[in-house]
Amino acid sequence: MASANLNIMIRAARKAGRSLVKDFREVENLQVSVKGAGDFVSRADREAERIIKEELRNARPNYGWIGEETGEEDGEDPTRRWIVDPLDGTTNFLHGLPHWAVSIALEHKGEIVASVVFDAAKDELFTAEKGDGAFLNDRRIRVSGRRQMIESIFATGVPFAGRGPLPATLRDLGRLMPLTAGVRRWGAASLDLAYVAAGRYEGYWERGIKSWDVAAGVLLVKEAGGRVDSIHPGQSPVESGSIVAANPQLFDELAGIVRQRD
Ligand code: LIP
């Protein structure tokens, strides 16, 4: 059974998701402002973050907060904070591509303990709580059982608009593409991790990623039986800006490849 906190997170994600779906239908009329080349923030995005913040703050006024649009705020309780991306996959959203999600994680003493990733366009709700498994629309999910790289699909994110670690990413791709059944770049990191948890992808890695993009997905993968780490050993996969995740059979091989220096 979902905890009170998880139910609060689900309610917030569904409410924000409803607002986003409405705006997605009218995506051409949205007023967009440019935050940086290729990185658009829409009115829909800001409204979704407002909705989530209001819901979570009303229910748990003393928790801290970090959100993609509104930044960081300390709470009276220094041990707990929400990590929120109201619209992961912003570029997809703005191009009318139905692959984006609301991502909400609860961190306690530096560890993610509850997660929601809600793909409102497809009505897929991924949830997890520490020690209780991972679920897709209330059905238990597990990472894939594939053992061979050549039969496996991996997701990643690639730099855009002249930012991010392009040479390292190209090196990763050059090493992985000949060894695998395919590499996908679908443009929403929270869903990449949710799909690893659901066994749709065998693994995922990305460089130059933010905590709110991956915080919720990290727990989904772990609770579905997968492994997650930073590409830089010893660092946090949520905070370090680089992440590698996979089923347990293929994790070492994938991590070994993306950790290789020249
Ligand atoms: C995006 C990701 C995407 C990643 C981008 C970006 P946003 O998040 O989830 O997959 O490659 O670097 O961070 O900006 O849409 O929330």
Image: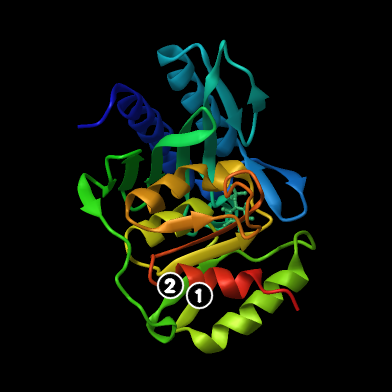
Which element carries disc 1, helix, strand or loop? helix
Q: Nearer the viewer, residue 27 or 126?
A: 126
> In which quarter of the view is residue 142 placed?
bottom left
Res. 25 in view: no
What residue does disc 1 label?
253
* Callout 2 amino acid: Leu
With 21 as the anchor, is 46 left or right in this view? right
Q: In this image, 41 relative to 166: left or right?
A: left
**Residue position for label 2:** 250
Q: Nearer the viewer, residue 149 or 116?
A: 149
Q: Amino acid at mark 1?
A: Glu
For residue 146, above or below residue 223: below
Helix, strand or loop status at disc 2: loop
Image point (64%, 40%), residue name = 31
Q: Are marks 1 and 2 in contact (CB under 8 Å)?
A: yes
Q: Give left or right: position of 230 versus 215.
A: right
Give percent across and percent down for residue 34: 74, 45
C-alpha gap between disc 1 and disc 2? 5 Å
In the depicted view, which residue is nearer to us: 120 or 134? Answer: 134
Q: How is the image coloured?
A: rainbow
